[in-house]
Amino acid sequence: MELREIRTFLQIAQKQSFSKAAEALGYSQAAVTVQIKQLEEELGIHLFDRLGKKTVLTHHGEIFYRYAVTILGTVADAKNAVSASTELSGDLTIGTIESICESIFPDLLKKFHQLYPNVSVSIVLDSPDVLLDRMNKNSIDLVYLLDQPIDDKRFIKVLEAPENISFVSSSVHTLAKNDPTDLASVISHPFLLTEKNASYRFVLDRYLASLGKEVKPFLEIGNTEFIINMLKQNAGISFLPEFAVRHEVESGILSILPVKDFHMELYRQVLYHKDKWHTGEMDAFIELAKETFRTSPGSDEHPQE
């Protein structure tokens, strides 16, 4: 059994395709097929099934997958232990949502690059559910999310902190100039909202539904920055994490609208898979994410041990 065969096996399992794995590894598809055949003969098992256009793990393949991850992780640790240089130089794939990517990641990743210039970072943007599913399939190293508390035994949580989600408008909007108003009055105004699969849009819709109410936005878009730019033009009201508009609120361009008897929180969370062999690159990012949050305005971290 060779390490290249194990690497090829993991690539096929993650990409669910022999051809995509071959392309990623720089092999011909025939070479990949031969490697897997040799591995299957040595193990005495069948590793993959073809279901339609997808290649999926068999039951025995799923068992071997866990050991394959551990084997390559152990090899990586051994190389790091005997290396004369302690400088990180690997890859790191992070899953996150639009608002965090636009508001938190610029400063965080700038500092990360300054500290670890040889680490190659890839960012994957999607909804929390999709990102967690991709992390479960090992195509993402870790996720940085804003969502309801995630309590899933498959994942290890290393950062959890509450974040206020509020109604936001231009500082010249009618409601921004008044005393606290009621919820019915707020949702009667024109709205710009993120798509329905966004975590904070989902909790707003669910809460309003529990009251027999709903909000019908005139615009739905997944781009938080676009919504903020529209708010600056006094185009309506939105429902956003306060950290996403902190700069605009502090500069007096936008306002957090005070609403009677209404308070909504979600949680900033960093997680990785419990079976993931966490690399030095992952550990470095996690520690920097924690430190960056601890020193951010209004931080209230709940560290996970």
Image (spheres, rainbow, N blue to C red):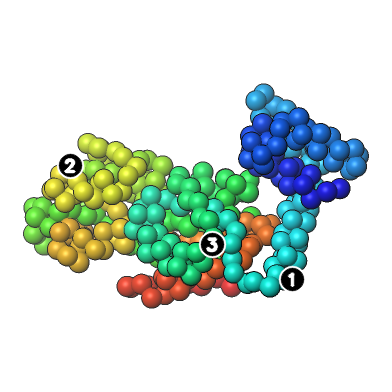
Q: Residue type at mark 2?
A: Pro
Task: Please name the residue shown 86% across and 38% down the image.
Answer: 38
Residue extending furthest front? Answer: 84
Image height of 201 relative to 29, above or below: below
Query: Mark 3 or mark 2, which is nearer the start of the sequence?
Result: 3
Query: Mark 3 or mark 1, which is nearer the start of the sequence?
Result: 1
Task: Please name the residue shown 69% across and 57% down the image.
Answer: 275
Residue extending furthest top? Answer: 52
Residue named by callout 1: 82
Q: Dot 2, crowdedness within 10 Å: few (<14), some or many (≥20)?
A: some
Gap in Å between the C-alphas at discs 1 and 2?
Answer: 62 Å
Query: Mark 2 or mark 1, which is nearer the start of the sequence?
Result: 1
Question: Viewer-nearest of labels 2 and 3?
Answer: 3
Image height of 100 relative to 65, above or below: below
The percent position of residue 294, horizontal first and vertical second, equals 42, 75
Q: Quadrant of the C terminus?
A: bottom right
Q: What element carries label 2?
A: loop
Q: Is mark 3 on a helix, strand or loop?
A: loop
Residue named by callout 2: 190
Q: Nearer the viewer, residue 182 or 115?
A: 115
